[in-house]
Image (tube, helix red, strand yellow):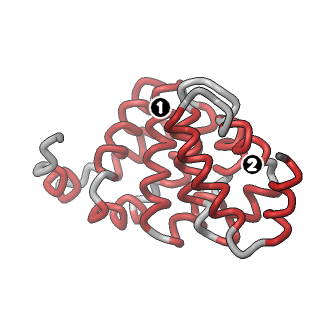
Amino acid sequence: AADCSHRPAVVLAGALPPLVSMLRQGSQQAQASAAAAILGLSEGAEHHGAILKAGAIAPLVKVLKAGVNDARLAAALALARLAAASSEAQGSIASAGAVPVLISMLAGGKLQMAAASAIAELSRSTDVRQAIARDGGVPALLALLNGANVGAQVQAAAAIGNICADDEASQSAIAKSG
């Protein structure tokens, strides 16, 4: 396990605003580094509030949409961690347009597990569950269940379980899909 003792000092020193600025305006390499740094800071739940307050969600979603793969991977994982922390974060991530992008990332490649993880965390919100289903997430998640990536399978199963919770229409649609 990595030594996490420096993270509070990094946040207290004011690192988040420049990192968020790098996500917004930096080169692709700068965006990848900033997304990786925010991912590292998001490992501890105690920093999630500061990350949200710094306005990191919309720029992370921007990187998710148009960054290089390393940046997209870090952004998806950071968004998954933030979504796990609060319903406020789940709503903000969905409102920023992350759901369709994450669904498209399920199609293949090294981004699948990170995208499935973010969708699994986002699907804990009733409103976001509906967006995932509406945007075609269910067939994409079901396809992952037959894929070779075990981590993506686990996250897809978690998301499907969340989507089906207390929703007979989703349960029926999934049953019909096989």
| Residue highlighted by disc 2 | 137
Quick one: SS at disc 2?
helix
Residue 72 at x, y = what percent? 52, 34
71 with respect to 136 (left or right):
left
Quick one: SS at disc 1?
helix
Q: Work out whether 80 lies above or below 165.
A: above
Residue type of the residue flagged with mark 2: Gly
> How far separated are the C-alphas under marks 2 and 1?
22 Å
Q: Which mark is residue 42?
A: none
Residue 106 at x, y = what percent? 66, 36
99 or 29: which is nearer to us?
Answer: 99
Q: Give the label, 2 or 1, closer to the camera.
A: 2
N-terminal of the two: label 2 or label 1? 1
47 or 114: which is nearer to us?
Answer: 114
Q: Residue at x 30, y 44 (%)?
A: 40
Residue 157 at x, y = what percent? 61, 50
107 with respect to 113 (left or right):
right
Residue type of the residue flagged with mark 1: Ala
| Residue highlighted by disc 1 | 71
139 with respect to 45 (left or right):
right
